[in-house]
Amino acid sequence: MRIEETILRNLIYNEEYTRKVLPFLDNKYFHDFSEKVLFEEVAKHVATYNNCPTRETLEISLGALGTVSEDQFKDLISSVEMMEKGKDNPVDIEWLLTETEKFCQDKALYNAIMGSIEIIDDNKKTTTGTGEIPKMLSDALSVSFDPNVGHDYIEDSEERFEYYHKVEERIPFDLDLMNKITKGGLPKKSLNVIMAGTGVGKSLFMCHCAGANLNAGLNVLYITLEMAEERIAERIDANLLDVEVVQLSTLKREKYLSHIESIRNKTSGKLIVKEYPTAVAHVGHFRHLLNELNLKKSFKPDIVYVDYLNICSSSRVKPNANTNSYTLVKSIAEELRGLAVENNLPIVTATQTNRQGFSNTDVDLTDTAESFGLPATADFMIA
């Protein structure tokens, strides 16, 4: 017996199973015509009447279809009769749920691969062309049954108590004052923003923090859209070697390599700097970079620096869309925060002050340049 037949039979005669799996099933997962039509009718009945259909209601609804031939109708009725005969067969619900999830994952991946082949062969016209393929595969690979339907205030009280007393994992600064302000450092799944005027030292501060993270044994990814990779590495060198930037060009090769070897020996972390053109890269590029680093270098960052937010582009707001700066910057901030949540790490970025804030001795949130939507989205902001 095929798994499709078992799934359809239990959708009709096992209400507990139906309510658990129906939200995750799709008619595209059923490639046989009769099975697809049966699934669609069952799903339609449940959505309309909030209960499983009987054999009689199924036969009536199938008979009312004007899109099936007489032979197809006979096959459908034969399938319904066969399922009724097996309705009393015992079934392990946990096994069936696991097998149904696997069925959905396999069919979703198969459909994505076949769709990708069609796009490549240009048999299927799309607005984005081959650029749609990574999203199709990513969506297929993310198919899963999520049993979580919310937090039960009474039943989940014990887990909630444990949460209250759990020490949140944070990435500390090497500055005591910053640790005091942040209660021990930056939490995971957070967007953290440094705000200052032009030329004040936002990049210098982030380079200093990146170097400190490396010394602490963490994996660090530094994404720059403003300066060249070598310039960022130069500033990190100056911090870790405790010399001025201008002195790096006069250091002897042996001394420089000795310093680097010393850093290598005392840390288990890695620091990777990646440069993108200004106003070209968005979260989609950063997500791809994280996947590439994981695949090619087995590198998973503990913290990501993006230098800086306002010169990123948005993956949702298209270029030349005549969008105001409030919407654009807020969209970029939301996408970066989403990336932080998705990868369970803190993201540190920077933004500039507006003209008033540049000369203000006591900078506040109203001095944020371009968009007040940024402080509304950020988890932590310091000026």
Image (tube, helix red, strand yellow):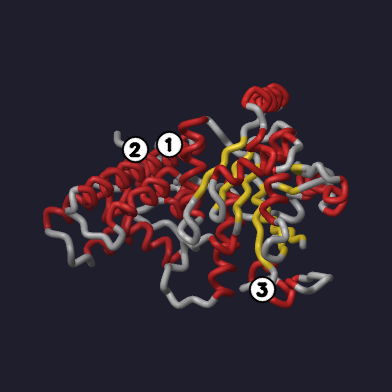
Q: In the rendered picture of this protein, how many numbered marks are placed on residues?
A: 3
The residue identified by callout 3 is: 372
Label 2 and label 1: CA atoms lie apart by 8 Å
How packed mark 2 is, by other alpha carbons closer than 10 Å (few <14, some 14-19, many 20 or more), is few
| Label number found at residue 3 | 2
Can residue 212 be seen at all in this image of the molecule? no
- The C terminus, quarter of image: bottom right
Label 1 and label 3: CA atoms lie apart by 49 Å
> Which residue does the image show at 45% across and 47% down from the upper left?
14
- Residue 162: x %, y % from top left: 80, 43
Q: Secondary structure at mark 1?
A: helix
- Residue 291: x %, y % from top left: 48, 40
Residue 378, by quadrant, is bottom right
> Which residue does the image show at 58% across and 36% down from the upper left?
300
Going by the numbered disc 1, the residue's amino acid type is Glu
Going by the numbered disc 3, the residue's amino acid type is Phe
| Label number found at residue 289 | none
- Residue 140: x %, y % from top left: 39, 46
The residue identified by callout 1 is: 99
Depth order, front residue of 357/113: 357
Can residue 293 be seen at all in this image of the molecule? yes
Depth order, front residue of 215/360: 360
Q: Are marks 1 and 3 in contact (CB under 8 Å)?
A: no
Going by the numbered disc 2, the residue's amino acid type is Ile
